[in-house]
Image (cartoon, helix red, strand yellow):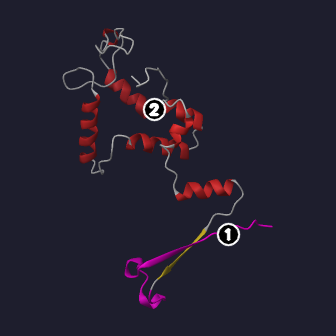
Amino acid sequence: MPKDGDVRNVPLTSKAISIARRQLEGRPLARGCGIPHSDGSECRHDVLFHNTQGRPLRPVSMGNRIRNASKKADIPLRGGYSGRRGFATRAAAGGMDAFLLADVMGHSDVRVTREYVQMGQDARARTLAALGEAPSLSVVESVGQRGTDHGTNPGDHPLRSTTIQDHGNPA
């Protein structure tokens, strides 16, 4: 249940639908989950994820499962909102409308969603290009000896980067 008590529809990928069907398979879905709604009414629907005892999975247990999966997959453990930030960033980069993204994430204001989207240099460059501004040019040069006779392994030479901004308008 969203913290604001609202109900929202969230689009699911075919893989997510497959996982949901597998989770719900063989369950009596009309029995209710046993968790009262924010308005105090009894829940008449089951929840998607259960714990090993067959009861609704609580947020703490979900966090434990995420931590265990991260360890098993050898993925660095991040904070609880890193998944939301990752989703928002990828959805925005994939072209999802900002207002739809805010709705899916449960935000009433698109400015809140903006805080979840992490825009990298490539996204900034695409934005500037779409606005007709030439992106900055980065020059990376080796510090020290140069030439193919000194090897081509970048690890052999420290690199220095310089960014050049062209603020003029092309004619």
- Residue 117 horizontal side relative to residue 34, left or right: right
Secondary structure, mark 2, is helix
Give the mark nearest the N terminus, 1 or 2: 2
Quadrant hosting residue 51: top left
Residue marked by disc 2: 14
The mark found on residue 116 in the picture is: none
Q: Name the residue type under label 2.
A: Ser
Q: Name the residue type under label 1.
A: Asp
Q: Position of residue 1 (x, y in %)?
A: 39, 22
Q: Is residue 82 above or below residue 122?
A: above
Residue at point 38%, 44% (across, down): 82
- Residue 134 horizontal side relative to residue 9, left or right: right
The C terminus - image quarter = bottom right
Which numbered disc, 1 or 2, marks the residue closer to the eye? 1
Magenta span contains residue 122? no
Q: Position of residue 26 (x, y in %)?
A: 29, 17
The mark found on residue 166 in the picture is: 1
Quadrant hosting residue 123: bottom right
Q: Is residue 60 above or below residue 88?
A: above
Magenta stretch, residue numbers: 144-171
